Image (spheres, rainbow, N blue to C red):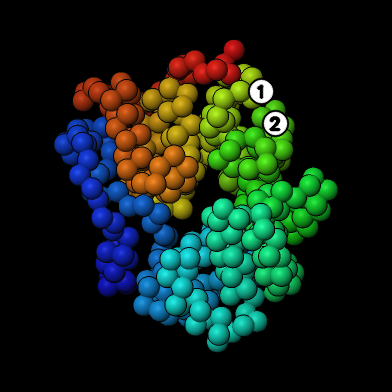
Amino acid sequence: MVDTMASLRAFLRVTRTERNTPPSPLLATAGLTADDEVLLDAPDARLGPALVAAGRGEYGPAAELLAGTRATTEWENRDRYVVRLAAFAHSRAEWFTSWRSAAPHDPDMLLVGAELAVTRAWASPARAELLHQTGPLVEAAAVGDPRDPVPWRIALDRARGSDADHGEFERLWGEAVRRSPHHYGCHVAALQYLSTSPFLSPGGRGSHRECFDFAERAAQDALPGSLVQALPLHAAFAYLTEDGGGTVMARTRLDAAADTAIALSATYPAAAPWPAELRNLLTYVLVGLDRWQDALLQLRLTGPYTTSFPWDRFSDDPLGRFLEAREEVRQNAPAARCAACAGHPRSEHGGRAHSGDH
């Protein structure tokens, strides 16, 4: 295990350019991890060995991991792992090519293959046309295990990028929730379809009000501890990233979305990889609302982990963008500026006036 984790840590390291960052004592005083200790998209203890093995060209651990999630119906973990494995296969495909050749009908391989194909199509200027061509792969993944909601999340992503109409999207949504009524990935895909943010939905089909209505209803119906409770946070992100115009959204609704996500974050373990994306997204929204103290708390809970989303929506260097945002928080949060301050900062509902504030 020690050798595996050492290999994983080396595997995660990226080349770092020189940055104008504060000395580590200032970060330590603020309760933050040193810049050179921050890891981008670090996997959890189950996914890590599978990625290390894939780096050696071996698909067995990845296949075993996904087969286990299917056997135990761990659909949220399964979705998370499929996304990460497909992203790895996008840059280093040898291990996945070997898996496909050895087990062409393996439902777990088919699922990774569908996610990989849709991801590649999304990245292309010919997105809509290429996404249409991925239909057979997504359908094969759905047939692989009829209980699995993850292929339907992929189908929803495909529909969003290929400009599917509302009727088709609602059909896919019905298939998804029939399998797992509270599946987080499917809910995020549906919210993104409703979004007008160019970062989330190229078609701009819905409205911010529709986004928030859907997100808030889903969060109220969510199971205790479910990431679906953070769906209004995604709606807030969509609102804050819209490029001008749009519906005027009450500041209280944005703050309520952040507060719900803060409460959810507090139930998850600190300095753990898997809640890091929630906390990174929450940090972005809190910075957008000038809630510096709350953002500082989330950065402390995040520990050494950052995630590509949401920072890759604004920069080709998501790690660098995260460190810049973190430094902005350090400079603006009173608890970070005052070395004598101790304990958790209190919530603050103030901030810059956005174009949509009342």
Q: Is residue 170 in view from this perspective?
A: no
Few, some or many residues within 10 Å of mark 1 (<14, 14–19, 20+)? few
Q: Which amino acid, by three-letter code, is at mark 2?
A: Ser
Identified at 28% across, 38% down, the residue is 32
Q: Earlier in the sequence, mark 2 or mark 1?
A: 2
The residue where tag 2 is placed is: 207
Q: Quadrant of residue 158?
A: bottom right
**Visible residue check, residue 163:** yes
For residue 148, which quarter of the picture? bottom right
Q: Is residue 49 left or right of residue 339?
A: right
Position of 12 with respect to 235 (left or right) is: left
Residue sitting at the far bottom: 102
3D distance between C-alphas at marks 2 and 1: 7 Å
For this view, does 7 lie left or right of residue 289? left
Q: Are marks 2 and 1 in contact (CB under 8 Å)?
A: yes
Residue marked by disc 1: 247
Q: Residue visible at 40% across and 79% down?
A: 57
Label 2 secondary element: loop
Q: Identify which residue is drawn at 66% across, 29% down.
A: 208
Q: Position of residue 160 (x, y in %)?
A: 68, 49
Instruction: Look at the picture and state if 15 lies above or below 228.
Output: below
Rate crowding at label 2 as few (under 14), some (14 to 19) or many (20 or more) other CA atoms within 10 Å: some
Q: Judge by depth and name the residue closer to the eye, 126 or 255.
A: 126
Residue 222: image location, x then y, percent: 67, 43
Indicate the quadrant containing the N terminus: top left, top right, bottom left or bottom right: bottom left
Label 1 sits on what residue type? Thr
Residue drawn 47% across and 46% down?
Answer: 309
Q: Position of residue 140 (x, y in %)?
A: 70, 72
